[in-house]
Image (spheres, rainbow, N blue to C red):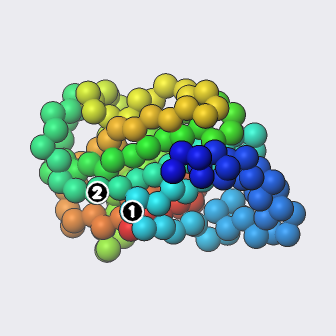
Amino acid sequence: MRINRKITRTLAPAAVAGAIAIGGAASAFGAPAVAQFGATQSLNAGLIVTDYTVSNLRPSDDVVNFPVSGRLWEATTTVDAAQGTATPTIMFFNARADSGQNYRALYQGSAPEGVNPMPLPQGAESTGKIYFDVTGAMPTSVVYNDAVTDRLIWG
């Protein structure tokens, strides 16, 4: 599996450049990319490409170092620096209910099993959990929203 991923990484910059040239890079220029939980999606920020894999959205029994008003939820997340040095941007993740209600990721503090927020050199990856304080309807998806628009969605 790691071999396939390396081949994908080698081909990815050319594929992204081709998609941009013909106007087909949906996550950069139009509708957000949508995938099932467990799928890897790429976030292209020019010279930096970060691959995110989100899975296992569920209620959590973990102990975290920040206040929780509702029920703590978690999603296992792998961050991979596919091109350039990538910094996990956990603050842009939301758990989302079918009603559209969002629960912003709890990123203000640290958690022993949380995603490490430190920059990753190209080719490195880090796996941990992203936590959400769910105060209403049960979330069914995880969304990466860059504070302007949805960029990646898992559900």
Question: What is the spatial separation of the Cα atoms under label 1 and label 2, in whole angstroms?
Answer: 8 Å
- The answer to whether 12 appears left or right of 147 in the picture is right
- The answer to whether 6 appears left or right of 13 in the picture is left
Residue at x-position 76% and y-position 70%: 24
- The answer to whether 45 appears left or right of 68 in the picture is right
In which quadrant is the C terminus drawn? Answer: bottom left
Residue 9 pos. (x, y %): 67, 47
Residue at x-position 35% and y-position 55%: 55
What mark, if any, has residue 37 been given in the picture?
A: 1
What mark, if any, has residue 57 been given in the picture?
A: 2
Q: Is residue 2 above or below residue 23?
A: above
- Characterize the local packing of mark 2: few (<14), some (14-19) or many (20 or more) Cα atoms within 10 angstroms: many
Residue 33 pos. (x, y %): 57, 66
Residue at x-position 81% and y-position 54%: 14
What secondary structure is found at the residue carrying circle 1?
loop
Given residues 145 and 117, the one toward you in this image is 117
What mark, if any, has residue 75 been given in the picture?
A: none
- Characterize the local packing of mark 1: few (<14), some (14-19) or many (20 or more) Cα atoms within 10 angstroms: some
Q: Type of residue at label 2?
A: Leu
What secondary structure is found at the residue carrying circle 2?
strand
